[in-house]
Image (tube, rainbow, N blue to C red):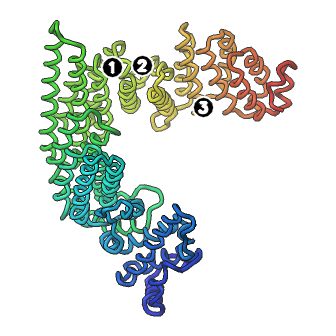
Amino acid sequence: MGAILDDHSSMDEEYKFVTSDDPDLLANMASIPGEKEGDLVVDVNLNVGAVVVGEVEDVFVRMEYNQEIIELEDTNPNVGSGSCSWWNANPNMSHDCMGVAVVALGPETFLKLLPLNVEAQRLSDVNVWLFPILRQHIVGARLSFFIETLPDNIRLLKLKSAKHMQEGHVHSARSVDRLVCSLWSLLPSFCNYPVDTAESFKDLATELCHSLCRESDFRGVICLSLQKLIQQNKRIKEGGNEASGEVSISQQQAVFLYTSEVAACNLEVLRSSALEILSTLLNIFLKSSKDEGGSLQITIGEFASIADKSVVSRLFKSVIQKLLESKKETSKVQNTRSSSSMEIDNSSNEQGKLYDLAVALLPGLGTKEVDLLFAAVEPELKIQKKAFKALSAVLKVILFCIDFIARRFEDLLKLMFEVMCSCPSSAKRHRLDCLHLLIAHVLKDKSEQMKHEIVASFLIEIVLGLKESNKKIRNRAEEIILQIGHFCMDEDKSGNKENLYNFFIMVLAGLACEMPHMISAAMQGVAHLTYEFPDLLPHAFNVLPLAYLLLQRKNREINKGCLRFLKVLVAKSQAEGLETHVRGMVEALLSYQNSIAKVKQLLEILVKKCGLNAVREVMPEEHVKLLKI
């Protein structure tokens, strides 16, 4: 019984063994001492599947007794039981045993035999230890069971919490509030491939809409649950599989019941509630001070992707109408002498939220609505960060749908040039997102001359992005540079090593600038290309004399870029290629005294590549101590 049986005949024999040959096995299972106890419970539940309730009821009574003994042992070492020593020593296996019981019986039967007891007068009587087990193992349950039981328990607990607060029992009130959180935390598990979505979601949607309005603390978990329902059904309908990784047997069984027809039926029911849920989410988003983790926006996007186009279009137009009205109000405020900066900031924040809402609805929009959003965004790009964010979202979503970039390429290109110098610093990341997508389109479809002209026009801005303090901006700039490099090598697009070398020279040209900031950025760009494309190594070695000269300028920013370039060159080169450059590198590093730690690090890499003797031969005696011997 140590492994899951693969064929039905062996499973039948196993079942007969459990139910006929040894009828007392299940009843005594919870008190079997030793390591086999947990394995036995797990194997019997997995192999038999749906076991008889009457036979396992005593098992749960014993398990619950053992859990109580364990809790007593935690507080009083003098209280103990030999029968639960294994459970105390192997908490993970004991949880697995209970988890398999949840899967085999289903959460409804399981909770009848071993209830949560949230209605108990004493908080110590509540089986809080069951919550993590239920969260992990509930799959393929009924949504109707959640609707019928848990909301009532939540309301009861909230009344109890309010009563404790009135009586001044703050600690007890907080403990009850934690129980409410634990109950809400079960919702995503009940939304994990439920068996009655088509029959029960309408009732659940009504309950969740009320809770979204009243329970601000639990909007995140509610949104996560709704996202899971939509994503799982969309994936099944489109013929996709569960995400890669370890998938439990119970998950596999639940997915097996989800055919494309079932998923389509579920999505139809979800679609019928989209207007109610979307309206609720939009109103909450506009009224809330912040959307933690973007959960509201993501959920809006998921429902927009499955809702009727007419519903999404209507909601989108109402958002755009509010945006235009807000702009008019802002214009009036700015033209009034008595207007305060606070009023202007409030209007700007409201417009930012409306841009976010318009972007969230993008998955359900058509060509006309996208053009309308672009018209609203265009005049704001010079002053509004959210406008650039909206434009980048438009380009991301529409790139593979209605080819917005192809239709409006000239307008987009002109717009990028016009706002190049006036772009707010806070919007740089979103501007680079736009450039990333525009350049991807240029490299894919335009002529060689246009490719060269457009890349050259924006290259300085992209390379300077490597020096931004914001990590996301730096990463995006690096992605664009490497994207262009890969395209230069793409044989399907007439790419070759010569094209890559020409682009390498374009980036390298930044070293001719007098600004230390630009020199450092160009050196980092060259380092990124050298690291990504080994074919550039011979050309990168030709840059070494210039790097040595730049290190002598004693400029911290330039030196930082040069050291990164040297580090990449040493790390990516073979020992044979480095031998002729060891002396020059060592001399250049020893002349740089601003960061002994970085010098030591580079010397260590050189030693690993070329050997200690090769480095020591060219090292002055007074600096040998820098080598770790």
Question: Looking at the rendered structure, which numbered label has been put on residue 624?
Answer: none
Q: How crowded is mark 1: few (under 14 residues within 10 Å), some or many (20 or more)?
A: some
Horizontal relation, residue 330 to residue 475: left or right: left
Task: Indicate the amino acid at tag 3.
Answer: Tyr
Measured as percent of width and height from the top left, residue 82 is found at: 57, 75
The first of marks 1 and 2 along the sequence is 1
Question: Looking at the rendered structure, which numbered label has been put on residue 416?
Answer: 1
How far, Cα to Cα, is label 3 from label 2? 22 Å
Q: Residue at x 47, y 57 (%)?
A: 245
User: Which residue is denoted by mark 3 in the rendering?
Assistant: 531
Pick whichever, 124 or 17, lies toward us: 124
**Secondary structure of the residue carrying numbered label 3:** helix
User: Which residue is denoted by mark 2 in the rendering?
Assistant: 458
Pick whichever, 356 or 502, lies toward us: 356
Measured as percent of width and height from the top left, residue 118 is found at: 31, 62
**Secondary structure of the residue carrying numbered label 1:** helix
